[in-house]
Amino acid sequence: MSDEVKAEGGTTEVDAIVIGSGFAGLYSIHKLRNVDGLTVQAFENAGDVGGTWYWNQYPGARSDTEVNAYCYSFDKELFHEWKWSERYPRQEEIWSYLKHVADRYDLRRSIQFDTQVETATWDEAASQWIVTTDDGKAWRAKFLIEAVGLLSATKVPHFAGEDRFKGQIHHTARWPQGDVDLSGKRVGVIGTGSSGIQVISELADKVGHMTVFQRTPQWVVPSKHRPIAPGLLEKIEADYEGYWRDVLYSVTAFGFEESDIAAEDVSYEERIKRFEEQYEDGGGFQYMFAAFNDVAVSRVANAAATEVIAGKIRETVKDPVTANLLIPSDLYAKRPLCCDGYYETFNRDNVELVDVQHDPIVEFTENGIRTEDGVEHELDVVILATGFDAVSGNQLKIQHRGRGGVSLHDHWAHRPRTHLGLMAHGFPNLYMIYGPMGPFTNQPPLHEAQVNWVAGTIQHVLNNDLASIEATADAEEAWIAESDEGASGTLFAVTNSWINGSNIPGKPIINMFYMGGSGAYMDKMAHEVETDYRENFTLGHAPVPA
């Protein structure tokens, strides 16, 4: 393919367009440049690379995945040279890492920052995508790769009277660049999900007073932040390929040893003992998958897991009324959360917990927030830790028109529909990295695996002089059925959270993941390669020149 970007009729043409510059986007640029020298243009609506780690600069932001599996694997030298400081790095360190990757592989020259992709339209005659951006420009490319992020489309609720509020309002996922001085301020935090618990724990001893508005309490275990275990990274390097193979062919791809013991197969005393031990070692995903292998599918295992956390809450929080408000009534079947010092925060004299499930927020006032019980909570700053329109939100921000003019909004009107979480019927040559119906796993290792698979399909299209590759309707339907069947056997299916879209009013509440595990998913992708993509894809042939 040409190394030159071509401009025709006011439209700039490249071989591939990438949307996003987080973990998946950066690797997509790097990988695709090495497929027959493709010309690649990326667009990023932020001012720099980093994706979620650019936007989420709120106090306390850090990874809740151990860093030995929350990084790239494609270059052993990169793994060796970058020295991580601790088990769960802070936002600043992860963002620095991604900026280093962009510089090390000269990726910035392919990225146009501060640019929002608005539309993507399939041109059937040319077998190309026409992409328009908010600067009024149009681009053409044979291949379109969307690395727009699973948790990136912010959910910003609107409250009556918020325009009257004289203070500041900040969303955790759009935190202002640079410091926000909160010392001595009266701060309200709305939301107690992953971002909420981190910002609450980080700021409680720095602000004058903190009011936590909690609608739904969360099961939280400690992270046990600490330096990386001595010798761990060296041990990984000694069998580098073997380590990453084991990560990808595990269930969760988080890099820790997953349990092969079912809680139902041991005594009650043994269940409690193991969960106590795991609680003390820390880590949310470890608590769900390393103590036993059936916490997400067995109510017996789940009950033991929550019994231990509930006991810890009652031991930690001195006020029994507050402790009871902090204990969830639902299953331990959401994204597992971990944070050091979260429950201890509610013992502080300057921290107040407001139960907005019982007394909802009625309105913002000039001086704060009024709840249904008539209390006006006076505030200087409100922090919205209200999460995301997850999984499909960012895809649907772009107005897609596929084959025959079909709209992606219409195609997904009742639910997101894909094959492998990567491609949708009616949208040729469009790839969604970690898109809807993708694997429920740690993301960076699967990002790489998916991008490698995408690069393989593109190479196949080019090698065989094809115009396009597109998932068939039957493949899409079969994948959804298989994913739904797997999810129906889990407790996630009966617990409302962003995992099934229930956090967004009007959004279909439905399974949006393949929960068969990382290893099984890797085998699914490999099967498509082994069958030359003929079983579940339509391979479009380029028209023969007259």
Image (spheres, rainbow, N blue to C red):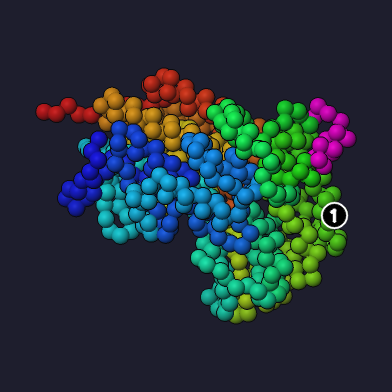
- Label 1 secondary element: helix
- In x, y percent, where is residue 301? 77, 36
Please, is residue 408 above or below residue 197 in the view?
above
**Residue underneath mark 1:** 314
**322 or 240, which is in the foreground?**
240
- Asked whether residue 524 is in view, the answer is yes
Callout 1 crowding tier (Cα within 10 Å): few <14, some 14–19, many ≥20: some
Q: Amino acid at mark 1?
A: Arg
- Which residue lies at the image location 65% right of the left edge and 49% below the top edge? 86
- Asked whether residue 495 is in view, the answer is no
- Which residue lies at the image location 64% right of the left edge and 53% below the top edge? 194
- In x, y percent, where is residue 441? 58, 38
Say which quarter of the image contains residue 413: top left
- Which residue lies at the image location 62% right of the left edge and 50% below the top edge? 85
Residue range in magenta is 264-277
**416 or 49, which is in the foreground?**
49
Please, is residue 108 above or below residue 162 in the view?
above
Assign the N terminus to one quadrant of the image: top left
| Lateral position of residue 525 relative to residue 311, left or right | left
- Outermost residue on the right side: it is 269
Please, is residue 252 above or below residue 324 in the view?
above
Say which quarter of the image contains residue 144: top left
- Confirm whether the magenta stretch covers residue 270: yes
- Which residue lies at the image location 54% right of the left edge and 45% below the top edge? 82
- Confirm whether the magenta stretch covers residue 85: no
| Lateral position of residue 219 relative to residue 517, left or right | right
- In x, y percent, where is residue 380? 63, 76
**380 or 89, which is in the foreground?**
89
| Lateral position of residue 445 relative to residue 255, left or right | left
- In x, y percent, where is residue 448? 48, 37
Prevailing SS of the magenta stretch = helix
Q: How many marks?
A: 1
